[in-house]
Amino acid sequence: MSEARVINGPHIRTQRTTRAVMMDVAISLVPVLLGAIYYFGIRALYLAGLSVAVCVLTEYIWQKLAKKPVTAGDFSAVVTGLLLVFNMPVTVPLWVLVAADVFSILLVKQMFGGLGNNFVNPALMGRLLVMVAWPQAVMQYVVPKTVSVDAVSAATILGSVKGGNTPEYSYLQMFLGEMPGAMGETSKLLLLVGFGYLCYKGVVNAEAAFTYIATVTVLTFIFGPEGLFTGDILLNLFGGGLIMGGCYMLTDYVFVSRRGKLLYAATAGVITAAIRIFSVYPEGICFGILTANCMAGMLSLLYKKHVYGIRKIKA
């Protein structure tokens, strides 16, 4: 017969604060913002400024009204505002962006207790809201200014391929960002530059991001319909927002252990790949990551975690 005895556990202390971490994430997104301005014009800057301002003000006003500690200055709302606008086309109406910002901060983040308590990614939920309520607002993409001087509407590359068309852009154009898409997802080069900075600062888990991206790429390569995704790894990798999702939208803080993070990332990857292959949606990143967010509790039951400070002794 044995019993569990609780003893004092170790505590890992660090000088890294939430504000410092979120500031690093915001800094890493600066190249992406500059790329959005270069490819889609000055309106991208205006939209980014509006999104950040609405997110910060929403968090500040709510915390003041609810008489809670004000954390609007910890840069987490800034990051949410940037990630949300980067998941939108440059043609998104201002009121739609504002509605998504308020929904993300107020209902998804603050109503569940604020940063660290929300169980899904606020920016992705804001994107999902717009996809469901106003789909035309986020489905009208324009060709970058470097490709066409006119604001020509076009489908995303994955959407075009899924419709039976041949890709009109080279792999290099996809990698650099010279293709239609959301403001922050087109340039893989700039996304990787920012992600490299986060890896250098030790903010993100590179293994989880790689696991997610590799899972989607491999599964779509093997099981994708003939002539659609099969045999074209670079199209799967560069043709949509996969790198944006893996490097910035995949919230891996829900698990502490390395094993849990990889399991979570792989699950999100499997769901994303399944949506890309079997559904009418060409992407699946939003649904894949959000579903994995909701499954975090169940996934944590699939492996045993060592609890520091507890050991079994025999009576």
Image (spheres, rainbow, N blue to C red):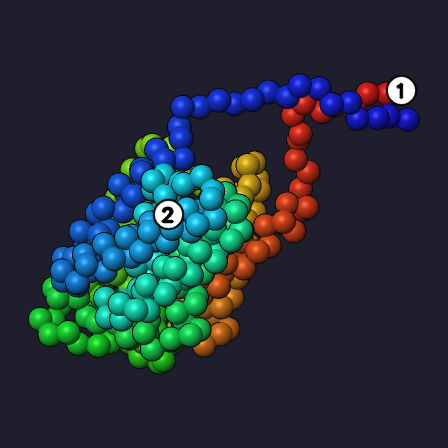
Residue sitting at 45 percent across and 77 percent down?
280
Count of numbered tags? 2
Who is closer to the viewer here, 67 or 138? 67
If the image is split into quadrants, where does the N terminus sit?
Answer: top right
Residue sitting at 64 percent across and 45 percent down?
300
Residue 136 in view here:
yes
Question: What residue did someone put label 2 on?
Answer: 60
Type of the residue with mark 1: Ala
Who is closer to the viewer here, 231 or 248? 248
Evaluate if marks 1 and 2 touch, with contact meaning CB atoms under 8 Å apart.
no
Q: Say which quarter of the image contains residue 307.
A: top right
Q: Which mark is residue 315?
A: 1
Who is closer to the viewer here, 108 or 70? 70
Residue 127 image point, x, y percent:
39, 64
Residue 216 in view here:
no
* 20 relative to 110, above or below: above
Left or right position of 196 against 287: left
Select label 1 or label 2 by which is in front: 2
Label 1 crowd bin: few (<14), some (14–19), many (20+), radius 10 Å: few
Q: Give the Cα separation between the discs numbered 1 and 2.
A: 54 Å
